[in-house]
Structures are given as structure tokens and as C-alpha cells.
Amino acid sequence: MHIHIFWDRLSPSGFQVPVKRLISSILGVEATVTENPVRIMGYVTARKQVDAPALLDSIQTYKHLHQITEPVLLVVHQDLFRNGNSFVFGLARESVGAGVVSTARLGNEYYGREASDEDHIDRIAKEGAHEIGHLLGLPHCTDQECVMFKPDTLDELDRKKKVLCASCREHLDSLIIPG
Ligand SMILES: [Zn+2]
Ligand SMILES: [Zn+2]
């Protein structure tokens, strides 16, 4: 079993390999990263945002066409929203093994702070590992330092460590069948 990471060509370049390595180490699952082949659907001009569920539909279609059964995480640069939320950092649909993460609000620049590649990479990896965690069957966690904690703000995302708590780790181990 391994995770497919699809990297949109306008997502920050040069981050692919460090993000992939971090996600792989957080979850303990192998990952590969390739240029995104999925059509970006759901862009809403008036909001300058992409409808995350529409993007998940697009991933679902691609997976079906290409008979990919393993989890797919798409990393895009566009800001994401879903019905009822002004924005989302990412979204996962466990039933089809598809997840998406936006890099838009994960860089310091967005908040008027000094840019840092390291911060940006860490946040994409934490958010990406979180969504893939859902695809592998993990629910949200109440431990604020655990990758499976649901952050509503950048500060909450930054408070998380690049690890699963002991209980999520144990849970994931029980969900992943070796080999
Ligand atoms: Zn979540
Ligand atoms: Zn946890």
C-alpha cells in the first residue's frame, strides 16, 4: 500500500519531496509524488476559490478511470471552500480515498508575516497527513498536538506536532494490514 500525492503545477515548487517525506514519516506509509493529472474542477470566479467537494469528484473520476484503489492526495494552490465554510485547509472523502489540500493559507505571506519555506512545508505536510489519515480510516482526535486534531486557525495548525498521538498511532496500525 502506498499513498499517491498529486502536485498541482502551480503549488509551490521544490516542496514536493520534503512534503512527501514528512507525510510518509508521520503516517509510516510509503508515498510517491507526481505532477497532478487531475482536472481542476469547481473554480468559482466570484469567490476566487475552488469548491472542494467538486474537486474531490474530479479525483474520484480520475481514480475510477485509471483504476487507482490507493489513497490519493491532491495538493493545489487555489484557496478551497465548501458549503457552509468560508474556507477549508483541506478536505477528505474516505469512501473514495480522495483528499485535497490547499497551500493558499499555509504560507506566512498570506498573513503578512515573513515567508518561510520550512513553515510552509511543515504545514502542508501536517494538513496532508491529516487528510490522508482520514482516508486510512482515522477520525478527528481531541489531542491538540496530534496530526488528527482538526485545526480551525493557523495557530491551531502550528500547535500540532508532526506525529500522531499514541492512541491514533495504535488505531492506524490496526487499520493498516502489513504487506
Ligand atoms: Zn479532518
Ligand atoms: Zn490523536
Image (cartoon, rainbow, N blue to C red):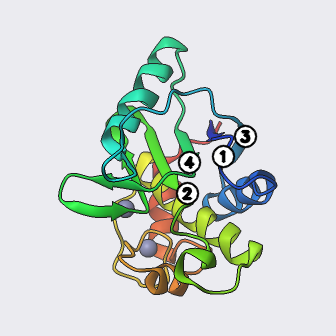
Vertical order, 170 against 29 (above or below): below
Please state which amino acid type lies under the numbered disc 4: Val
Tell me if 161 is positioned left or right of 59 in this view.
right
Instruction: Provide the residue designation for mark 3.
Output: 32
The mark closer to the camera, 3 or 1, is: 1
Q: Give the mark, 2 or 4, whose residue is nearer the N terminus.
A: 4
Measure the C-alpha gap from mark 2 to mark 1.
17 Å
Instruction: Provide the residue designation for mark 1.
Output: 10
Q: Residue 24: where, in percent of width, then height? A: 69, 55
**Callout 2 environment at 10 Å: few (<14), some (14 to 19), or many (20+)?**
many
Instruction: Provide the residue designation for mark 2.
Output: 128
Instruction: Provide the residue designation for mark 4.
Output: 76
Vertical order, 159 against 72 (above or below): below
Please state which amino acid type lies under the numbered disc 3: Thr
Measure the C-alpha gap from mark 4 to mark 3.
16 Å
Q: Give the mark, 4 or 3, whose residue is nearer the N terminus.
A: 3
Measure the C-alpha gap from mark 4 to mark 1.
7 Å
Vertical order, 61 against 17 (above or below): above
Please state which amino acid type lies under the numbered disc 2: Gly
